[in-house]
Image (cartoon, rainbow, N blue to C red):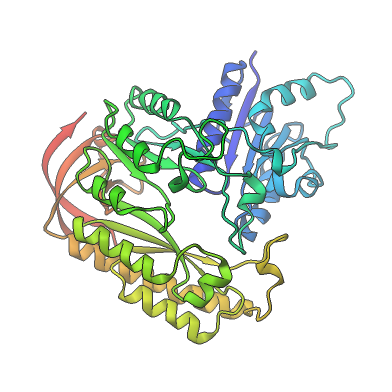
């Protein structure tokens, strides 16, 4: 009888793509995958360390697994596992902690320990490389969702932002080969998945380290142009991309692309040049303004999402308001607001002028309110237009939801026949829950 394995993923789209790849390696080794709430022999938790909250949730998830099966084997992988392996190993119930390069060999470690006659439950083994050694690239993609897949094209980061631990957790910037990205994209398209989301740590840096060297073999634009020609893909979506790496050539290509959709997610972090310098970001707010203007010039209907950090050391009331007003006046569609939290081994954690946590919370609430206003305004601007929607697979309180190409979330009464299908629709009104109602125009694909 085959052993059962369950997975839990914390954090970003990149983690989800890697969990899927790890899950396939277990399947190839004869394991049966089950939901995390079910009884399994092995539980794998893919960790994140971007925020304090992700760290704290790890213990809760381990307890959840133990509650279902106290004798289960629990393995931790991912960013937190690389940064603080001893801390995770000390959590009651954890058996194995694997770092950045070791996680893709997890089945070998798990099988060895499961079969070891002298293994003591709760005595965790750690296999974690020095982060300088994390220079191997492993391609990944997720296909757990019938409608959408996350395709990893790049890993690691060479930037030195003062608040960020990702370079310490994932190593140097390195890329998948263009040939392998296209192969993975084709494999995804053959499974009737309609949308691919490109993901990585710093995807605009694509091409660096493609064949193990430091130079760029290809550019991000090369990648985008090549993917646009892959047969069978209905939609391609760019996830987060740094403003200094989003070139006008890429924007202009997306505007006339066959498959790339008019949706960009561009980290800003602060609307204050003073704080951007303290953060060691590689642009000023003026460049960000230029990127937004360039997108809107060729794609007036484009959706633009923004990452922003509140409560960074040195953020006075005036500097926060500078960010608030900058965002309020910018033609953007929504915000992802991160409340700054101190991370070990970062320069920002040692900076003076620490912002009190209650002030951080207040500012975060203000920006989240602004995000609601921005999204509503963007949706209102789309009413009356004809868009293409891809419906998702979940019945949420009697409704099926979907996203237009420019990321307007719509709803319709539940109909299983709509799942994973594309339709032309006319956006008609915004409902009480902030989602958009519509009229069908035409069915595009089954």
In front: 24, or 60? 24
Q: Position of residue 118 (x, y in %)?
A: 90, 23
Quadrant location, the N terminus: top right
Q: Is residue 219 left or right of residue 439?
A: right
Q: Is residue 128 left or right of residue 212?
A: right
The residue shown at (26%, 51%) is: 406
The residue shown at (23%, 61%) is: 296
The residue shown at (58%, 29%) is: 22
Q: Residue furthest top?
A: 1
| Quarter location, residue 70 | top right
Q: Is residue 72 left or right of residue 263?
A: right
Q: Residue furthest right?
A: 118
In front: 190, or 257? 257
Q: Residue furthest bottom?
A: 318
Q: Position of residue 11 (x, y in %)?
A: 55, 49
Q: Is residue 93 visible?
A: yes
Quadrant location, the C terminus: top left
In the depicted structure, whether residue 323 falls above or below residue 189: below
Q: Position of residue 333 (x, y in %)?
A: 31, 63
The residue shown at (60%, 32%) is: 6
In front: 74, or 360? 360
Q: Is residue 37 visible?
A: no
In front: 138, or 37? 138
Q: Position of residue 372 (x, y in %)?
A: 35, 68
């Amino acid at each position: 009888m085959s052993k059962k394995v369950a997975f839990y993923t914390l954090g970003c789209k990149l983690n989800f793509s890697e969990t899927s790849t790890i899950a396939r390696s277990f399947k190839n080794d004869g394991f049966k995958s089950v939901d995390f709430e079910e009884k399994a022999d092995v539980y794998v938790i893919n960790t994140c360390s971007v925020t304090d909250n992700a760290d704290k949730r790890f213990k809760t998830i381990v307890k959840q697994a133990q509650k279902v099966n106290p004798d289960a084997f629990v393995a931790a992988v991912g960013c937190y596992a690389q940064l603080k392996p001893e801390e995770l190993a000390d959590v009651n119930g954890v058996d194995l902690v694997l770092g950045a390069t070791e996680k893709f060999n997890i089945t070998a470690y798990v099988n060895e320990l499961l079969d070891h006659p002298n293994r003591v439950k709760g005595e965790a083994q750690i296999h974690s490389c020095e982060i300088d050694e994390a220079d191997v690239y492993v391609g990944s993609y997720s296909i757990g969702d019938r409608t959408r897949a996350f395709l990893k094209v790049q890993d690691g980061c060479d930037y030195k932002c003062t608040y960020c631990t990702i370079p310490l957790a994932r190593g140097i910037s390195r890329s998948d080969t263009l040939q392998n990205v296209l192969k993975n994209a084709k494999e995804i398209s053959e499974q009737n998945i309609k949308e691919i989301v490109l993901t990585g740590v710093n995807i605009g840096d694509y091409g660096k380290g493609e064949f193990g060297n430091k130079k760029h073999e290809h550019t991000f634009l090369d990648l985008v142009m090549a993917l646009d020609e892959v047969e069978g893909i209905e939609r391609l979506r760019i996830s987060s991309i740094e403003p200094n790496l989003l070139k006008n050539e890429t924007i202009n290509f997306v505007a006339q692309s066959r498959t790339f959709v008019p949706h960009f997610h561009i980290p800003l972090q602060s609307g204050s040049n003073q704080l951007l310098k303290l953060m060691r970001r590689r642009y000023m707010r003026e460049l960000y303004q230029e990127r937004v203007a360039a997108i809107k010039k060729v794609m007036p209907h484009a959706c633009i999402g923004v990452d922003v950090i509140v409560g960074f050391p040195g953020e006075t009331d005036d500097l926060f308001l500078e960010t608030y007003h900058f965002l309020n006046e910018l033609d953007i569609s929504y915000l992802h607001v991160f409340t700054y939290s101190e991370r070990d081994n970062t320069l920002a954690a040692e900076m003076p002028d620490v912002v009190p946590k209650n002030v951080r919370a207040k500012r975060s609430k203000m920006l989240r309110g602004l995000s609601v206003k921005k999204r509503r305004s963007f949706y209102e601007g789309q009413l009356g237009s004809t868009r293409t929607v891809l419906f998702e697979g979940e019945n949420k309180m009697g409704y099926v939801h979907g996203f237009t190409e420019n990321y307007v979330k719509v709803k319709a009464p539940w109909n299983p026949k709509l799942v994973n299908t594309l339709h032309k629709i006319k956006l008609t009104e915004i409902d009480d829950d902030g989602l958009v109602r519509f009229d069908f125009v035409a069915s595009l694909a089954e």
